[in-house]
Image (spheres, rainbow, N blue to C red):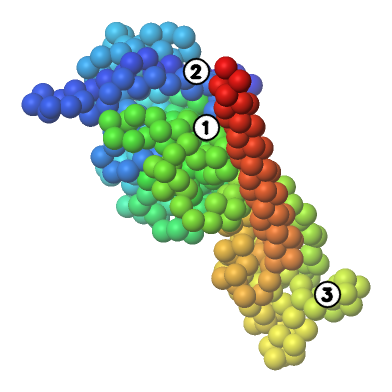
């Protein structure tokens, strides 16, 4: 990203309200919230609670009935809503791309509307395609129908970021793709945020997604009343009430695997060979490494196959015909839950870690992941014991105070 890239702006919602004509009660009722510049805040709540309505009032796709919206300290409640939307990126489920426009034309839409020169627009489109992991040369001239769901969603995010807005609103953007693609898109958003530091407000009904992505989570009741607004860890360990506990659900300790990233644990360097390496290199590395398998990389250094000595014998000495295809990989931004699922799906006790272009970066194994699970469970056990001890102390203090009170009354 260029040095001039715009970082996030604060958002303040003050008594934000939406009433629809003929409805006895408001759809959104007096929401007050401060969102810090550069953080990801997730709105999560039951269907119909008003979370999408609240999101759409921030860029005034839905006009508030009452209250104020401030972005970067500026009251935007009264300015031209069209100008406001050009300053606020917006990404929705199924990408919402214009089917008759190419990928480049879709991304260029807002910069063109605000009068950017052609050369600057062309450079920005290429920069953004590269940023969301799509080769500009390959995808520039394609139409949305020629893209997979995950690719369309990446283009949707690129389009939302095109004019370099400080704020990005995302309304269930990954809800329509398959679970594996969704995990990768979530990882991509986390990686992008490390680079861009935008202020992101993100709506989801999936609490696991909220834990994974959010710096803070707003758990919303009906009419967008805030049940709890806190960090994922605080909500998991200390839900405010039974309503919030219902969202957390069972297995809070395991859900905390969504708070720890692959980059936070030990990533091992595994022996690798490439398709172009001579066969002897495979045997040399196998002998010197002391492992019983090697990772075969393709010409772009992406994980391709897991190779064992026996595989090579059965394939009559050919690397191309030997081994087991790599079905799943994770990035350093993936959560330990993602990594654990990949390891369990693969049945081989390890998963390859890759960089932003899919290139090999290392391996995480089952032992490392299970150690992390045990540490989380132990931390939860100690915290529960400490909480119980505090309750017992509080009860003892209360009993003592009551006894003192009774004694005083008797003396009197």
- Residues 361 and 36: in front is 36
User: For the point 59% across and 53% down, which residue is it?
Assistant: 253
Q: Where is residue 266 in the image (x, y as percent from the top left)?
A: 77, 54
Marks 2 and 3, the one that precedes in the sequence: 2
Tell me the CA gap for discs 2 and 3: 51 Å
Q: Could you say which disc has been placed on residue 174 in the image?
A: none
- The quadrant the C terminus occupies is top right
Q: Name the residue under label 3.
A: 291
Q: Looking at the image, which residue is at 70% across and 59% down?
A: 374
Front residue of 203/396: it is 396
Give the numbered dot on residue 10: 2
Residue at the spot 42% in from the left edge and 43% down from the top edge: 242
* Residue that numbered label 1 is attached to: 230
**Residue drawn at (77%, 76%) of the image:** 293
Q: Where 57 falls versus 240 (above or below)? A: above
Q: Is residue 126 above or below residue 110?
A: below
Residue 270 locus on image (x, y percent)? 79, 64
Q: Are marks 2 and 1 in contact (CB under 8 Å)?
A: no
In which quarter of the view is residue 107 placed?
top left
| Whole-percent x, y for residue 63 in the image | 24, 20
> Residue 122 or 210: which is nearer the viewer?
210
User: Mark 2 against mark 3, which lies toward the viewer?
Assistant: 2
Q: Report which quarter residue 234 is drawn in.
A: top right
User: In the structure shown, which secondary structural element does the residue marked by tag 3 occupy?
Assistant: loop
Q: Can residue 132 be seen in this view?
A: no
């Amino acid at each position: 990203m260029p040095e001039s890239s715009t970082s996030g702006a604060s958002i303040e919602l003050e008594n934000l309200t939406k009433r629809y004509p003929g409805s006895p009660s408001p759809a959104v009722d007096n929401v007050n919230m401060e969102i810090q510049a550069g953080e990801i805040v997730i709105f999560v709540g039951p269907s119909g609670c008003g979370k999408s309505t609240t999101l759409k009032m921030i860029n005034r796709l839905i006009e508030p009935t009452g209250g104020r919206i401030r972005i970067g300290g500026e009251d935007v409640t009264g300015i031209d809503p069209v100008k406001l939307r050009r300053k606020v990126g917006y990404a929705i489920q199924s990408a919402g791309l214009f089917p008759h426009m190419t990928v480049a034309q879709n991304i260029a839409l807002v910069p063109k509307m605000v009068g950017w020169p052609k050369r600057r627009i062309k450079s920005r489109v290429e920069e953004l395609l590269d940023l969301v992991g799509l080769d500009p040369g390959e995808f520039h001239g394609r139409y949305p129908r020629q893209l997979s769901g995950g690719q369309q969603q990446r283009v949707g995010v690129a389009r939302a970021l095109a004019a370099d807005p400080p704020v990005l609103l995302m309304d269930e953007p990954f809800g329509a793709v398959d679970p594996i693609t969704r995990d990768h898109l979530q990882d991509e958003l986390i990686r992008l945020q490390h680079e861009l530091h935008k202020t992101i407000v993100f709506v989801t009904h999936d609490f696991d997604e909220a834990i994974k992505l959010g710096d803070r989570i707003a758990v919303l009741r009906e009419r967008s009343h805030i049940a709890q607004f806190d960090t994922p860890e605080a909500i998991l360990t200390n839900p405010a009430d039974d309503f919030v506990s219902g969202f957390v659900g069972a297995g809070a300790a395991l859900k905390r695997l969504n708070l720890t990233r692959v980059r936070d644990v030990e990533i091992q360097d595994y022996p690798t060979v490439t398709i172009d390496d001579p066969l002897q290199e495979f045997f040399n590395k196998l002998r010197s490494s002391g492992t019983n398998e090697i990772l075969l990389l393709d010409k772009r250094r992406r994980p391709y196959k897991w190779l064992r000595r026996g595989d090579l014998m059965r394939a009559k000495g050919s690397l191309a015909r030997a081994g087991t295809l790599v079905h799943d990989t994770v990035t350093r931004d993936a959560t330990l839950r993602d990594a654990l699922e990949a390891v369990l799906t693969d049945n081989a006790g390890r998963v390859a870690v890759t960089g932003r272009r899919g290139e090999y970066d290392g391996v995480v194994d089952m032992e490392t992941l299970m150690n992390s699970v045990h540490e989380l469970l132990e931390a939860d056990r100690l915290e529960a014991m400490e909480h119980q001890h505090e309750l017992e102390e509080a009860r003892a203090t209360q009993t003592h105070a009551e006894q003192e009170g009774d004694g005083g009354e008797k003396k009197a």
